[in-house]
Image (cartoon, rainbow, N blue to C red):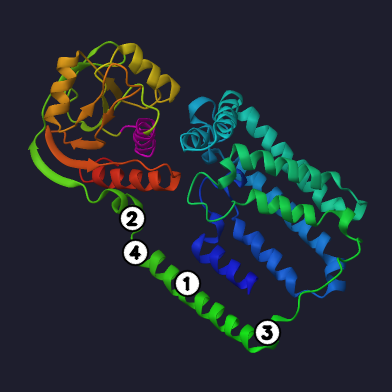
Amino acid sequence: MSALWASLIWLIGNGAGGIFASGASILFGWPGATLFYFVAGCWLFVEPEKFRKYFSTFTLRLLSAVFLIAIIFQSLPDAGFWHGGNQNALTVMTKEMATIAQPHALSWIVRHGGVLSGRLGGGFNLIVIFWLFVTGVGLWLATQRRWNWPVYSLVIGCLIFWVIAEDTAVFGGIATDFNSLLPIAVLGFCAAPRFQNAPALKGRLRVELTNGIGSVLATFATAMIATSIISMFVATTISATENTFYLAGNGSPSPLNTKAPTFTLTDQFNKSYTLGEHKGRVTLITFLDPVCWTDCPLLANQVAQVRSQLARDAKIDIVAVAANPYHETLGNVRHFIAIHDIEHVKNFYFVTGTRAKTSKVWAEYGIGVTATPTDAMSIHDDYMYIVSSSGKLKWIIPDDPPDEKSLNISTVAELKTLLATQGIH
């Protein structure tokens, strides 16, 4: 039952672990945790003698094959691991994960792991590939030569990357499983050659299906599996679920077709910026407190993700208006951009000005801002706005950013859908 359930989740719920997806990487969950739950479940059917004889060899060689295939995906240019700086795939992922609420020590490790990857660029990817190759070959030969070091290499490497590249898969996403690296580590450790001839543990579970209660439980489990198959089929073939979490948390954006209130403020480059000054461009507007450490970094991350998923030559300006009357200097703005690493976002303008000027913009766009001189940060409404290339306000978008990474991905999907209505892809 365990193996059957895991196989269904892997095939339907996980899309076969994205084994053929562009940019697949073992660091980011390929080939899917439930594949290894399936493997573990299958061994429950095996007789003890056959288990002792075949488990170690089969499991370690399966993991060896996974590692050697992973080298191919890790080496492909479109995976993004050969890039340096902010374009490195691991750097991008860790920056996103580090914004999620979690223990500071873990966030620090994740963030600095991404920084190291960006600095080394292709060099870091060579380290990963070398680890995959040495460990993969070692695992294949381990049972023949009674080697335990490949298993230790497997476990230690998986745990390191489980933290750095997957943020333990607990604080990000919706925590439906621990992602693939932890099950790989556990499965590999259990298959270590040093355990191959170890005596079996005493005691066995009683046969569960020899009484009425067991039969009822088995029938219930079968019904649950059948229900889940139908539900997953409907969800994956009928429902458009990409923006479901956004809509559930914020409601629907409001369409408009009125002239957008214009403004002229100063951007982070100490240059004047006027809304609509770049002819032919659509504008995505948000409001950020330069000293905020809660919602605003998440909002900034959302617009950075949106821009990274659009065509490089997409005709769009992304404008953030400073939303704190006591922390609106260019120094504040530049500090926010630096610590949240959004200076690479193309055509991004973080604009500010005198309190009179910014207050006027807040009022015209319906943004309530509350702050006193002693407050660490302001309290303000979280909305985004899409202004057409002709200067018309087309969408008002409520956006209360959640901490969960997967839910922010849903918001990014919704923003891309709305931008598409203005011809931005």
- Return the disc, 2 or 1, that comes first in the chain's sequence: 1
Can you say which quadrant of the picture contains the N terminus? bottom right
Q: CA distance from mark 4 to mark 2?
A: 9 Å
Image marks 4 and 2: residues in contact by CB distance under 8 Å: yes
Dot 4 corresponds to which residue?
Answer: 239
Looking at the rendering, the stretch of residues picked out in magenta corresponds to 295-313
Q: Residue at x 29, y 22 (%)?
A: 350
- Return the disc, 1 or 3, that comes first in the chain's sequence: 3
Image disc number at residue 209: 3
Q: Main secondary structure of the magenta part?
A: helix
In the image, is residue 29 above or below residue 14? above
Q: CA distance from mark 1 to mark 3?
A: 23 Å
Kind of residue at badge 4? Ser
In the image, is residue 199 above or below residue 89? below
The answer to whether residue 253 is magenta is no
Image marks 1 and 3: residues in contact by CB distance under 8 Å: no
Of tags 1 and 4, the one toward the viewer is 1
The answer to whether residue 304 is magenta is yes
Dot 1 corresponds to which residue?
Answer: 228
Q: Which secondary structure, mark 1?
A: helix
Kind of residue at badge 3? Leu
- Return the disc, 4 or 2, that comes first in the chain's sequence: 4
Q: Residue at x 29, y 34 (%)?
A: 314
Dot 2 corresponds to which residue?
Answer: 244
- Return the disc, 4 or 3, that comes first in the chain's sequence: 3
Q: CA distance from mark 1 to mark 4?
A: 15 Å
Q: CA distance from mark 2 to mark 1?
A: 19 Å
